[in-house]
Image (cartoon, helix red, strand yellow):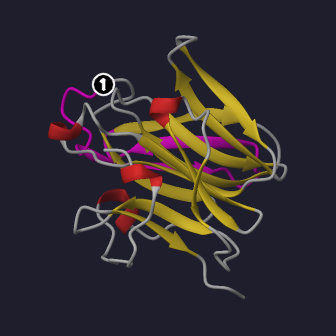
Amino acid sequence: MALPESTLSSQPVASPFIGGAALPVRAITDYQRGGVAIQDPSRGLNFQTWRARVLEDGKAIVLDAQQVAASTFITGNNITEVSLAFDQNMRPVIAYVEAGTAKLYWYDSSQGAQVTTSWPGMITPRVSLDDKRSTQGGTSDVIFAYLKNGNLYHRQQRDRYGSEYLLASNVNSPGLVKVGMSRNFRFQFLLQNPE
């Protein structure tokens, strides 16, 4: 389900992350639970753990899973960050930074194709499907979160990422580490500690 009224809880209710978000991440490696294969949600969106990683030369992003061989999804130059999600149809949604610019690789239903959108001014873009449970398929959204000008924002799949929602002002953090579902079934945002 989408974030209620696009707001954070009045009091933080922190809990350990679950799924792929529970695994340690680095700027160049992210994990996400997903289906049996790309564009195949037939066994649910919690079937296996997928990994997105930036190759050492910064020129490609590769996806693989326990039962899926590595495949290149994005090529570029000076790719320094990656974050992985899957939509309800097991199409990849990949937030990444290339040459200092945040980008989002996603399925645009109006074009019927995967597209890449650039977002200058954003830092530490992160993505996650907010609720992978099969009972939530009609209400779940891929959340695209980031910092910009010291504030925490998000965009969501149902808007085709076209609307920006302010979640918190002056967050006093150099960036997001990850976003995702927690053990208490709440969507969380993990921020880096201030330097």
Q: Residue furthest left?
A: 135
Query: How many C-alpha atoms fall within 10 Å of the one at disc 1: few (<14), some, or many (≥20)?
Result: some
Position of residue 123 in the picture relative to residue 21 (left or right): right
Q: Does residue 102 lie above or below 24 as drawn?
A: above
Give the tally of numbered discs.
1
Quadrant in the picture for the C terminus: bottom right
Q: Decide whether residue 49 is among the magenta residues.
A: yes
Position of residue 163 in the picture relative to residue 49 (left or right): right
Position of residue 2 in the picture relative to residue 160 (left or right): left
Please provide percent x and percent y for residue 43. Answer: 18, 32
Task: Compare residues 113 and 109 and report the one nearer the observer.
Answer: 109
Please provide percent x and percent y for residue 187. Answer: 36, 60
Please provide percent x and percent y for residue 104. Answer: 64, 38
Residue pointed to by mark 1:
40
Residue at image position (60%, 77%) is 192
Residue at image position (56%, 58%) is 29
Toward which corner of the image does residue 119 lie, by quadrant?
A: top right
Please provide percent x and percent y for residue 26. Answer: 58, 67
Residue at image position (55%, 12%) is 110
Residue at image position (38%, 79%) is 11
Q: Decide whether residue 28 is among the magenta residues.
A: no
Task: Compare residues 187 and 49 and report the one nearer the observer.
Answer: 187
Quadrant in the picture for the N terminus: top left
Q: Residue furthest bottom?
A: 195
Kind of residue at disc 1: Asp
Magenta stretch, residue numbers: 40-67
Q: Does residue 147 lie above or below 16 as drawn?
A: above
Under tag 1, what secondary structure? loop
Toward which corner of the image does residue 86 lie, by quadrant?
A: top left
